[in-house]
Structures are given as structure tokens and as C-alpha cells.
Image (tube, rainbow, N blue to C red):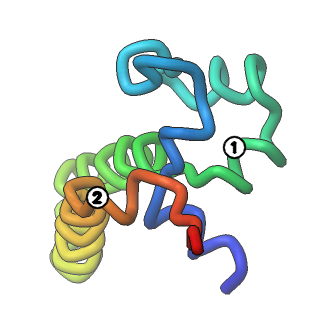
Amino acid sequence: MAEEAPRHYIDLDDYEDSAVFKLPRYWNQAVEKYGEDSLQAKGILPWHIYRVYLQLKEAFLINDPDRILRLSADLGHYVADAHVPLHTTKTTMVN
């Protein structure tokens, strides 16, 4: 799935200084500020974590154990990705 890769990273160094503090908190605001294509190219990890959280919350509300299990695993994976330095910075090779 081509849309899956950007869900696992965000290149914070592609944004202005203090990006982690200045980036829009909500997806619609981020799209308005940067455009969806730009966001997809730089990674959508923090916004996707929130989306999966909302899906997990809904799964609990409707008592869907299979969905709860799958979304819990997904959410754990994405949160772990957010703590990997190479998933939060653009990597370039310098000779």
C-alpha cells in the first residue's frame, strides 16, 4: 500500500525551527497550511496516530474485540515509530 509508508514517519527537519511545537495539531489545519501532497511526502505520523486512536476509541464504544486488538497493535506500532530518531528526521547520505 503506497499510502501506508507516510504513516510511519515525519521528517521534522523539513519544517521550520521548533516544528514539533509549531506544526498544526489537527489534520485539517495541517492540510490547510501545507497541502496534503506536501504532508504525505514529509510523513503524517503524528496525525495518523490521532486517527488510529479515534478508531480504537470507537471500537471500544461498539465493543468490537477483533478491531480493538488490531487497532491496539497498530497504535502501539505507530507510537513506537514516533520514538525512533530515523522516523522523525530526513536521512541524507553525506560523503
Instruction: Please say if 95 is above or below 23.
Output: below
Residue at (39% x, 62% y) in the render: 87
Closer to viewer: mark 1 or mark 2: 2
Kindly indicate the quadrant of the structure image that contains residue 94: bottom right
Instruction: Please say if 43 is above or below 47.
Output: below
Q: Kindly identify which numbered label has been placed on residue 39.
A: 1
Instruction: Please say if 10 is above or below 26.
Output: below
Count of labels in the image = 2
Q: Name which residue type carries label 2.
A: Pro
Residue at (78% x, 43% y) in the render: 38
Q: Is residue 93 something that shows in the picture?
A: yes
Q: Position of residue 68 (x, y in %)?
A: 20, 69
User: The N terminus lies in which quarter of the figure?
Assistant: bottom right
Residue at (46% x, 23% y) in the render: 19
Q: Kindly identify which numbered label has been placed on residue 85.
A: 2
Q: Secondary structure at mark 2?
A: helix
Q: Nearer the viewer, residue 30 or 64?
A: 30
Residue at (58% x, 21% y) in the render: 16
Q: Residues within 10 Å of mark 1 (few under 14, many from 20)?
A: some
Kindly indicate the quadrant of the structure image that contains residue 28: top right
Q: Residues within 10 Å of mark 2 (few under 14, many from 20)?
A: few
What is the C-alpha distance between the residues marked 1 and 2?
19 Å
Of the numbered discs 1 and 2, the one sitting upstream in the chain is 1
Left or right: 58, with 73 as reference point: right
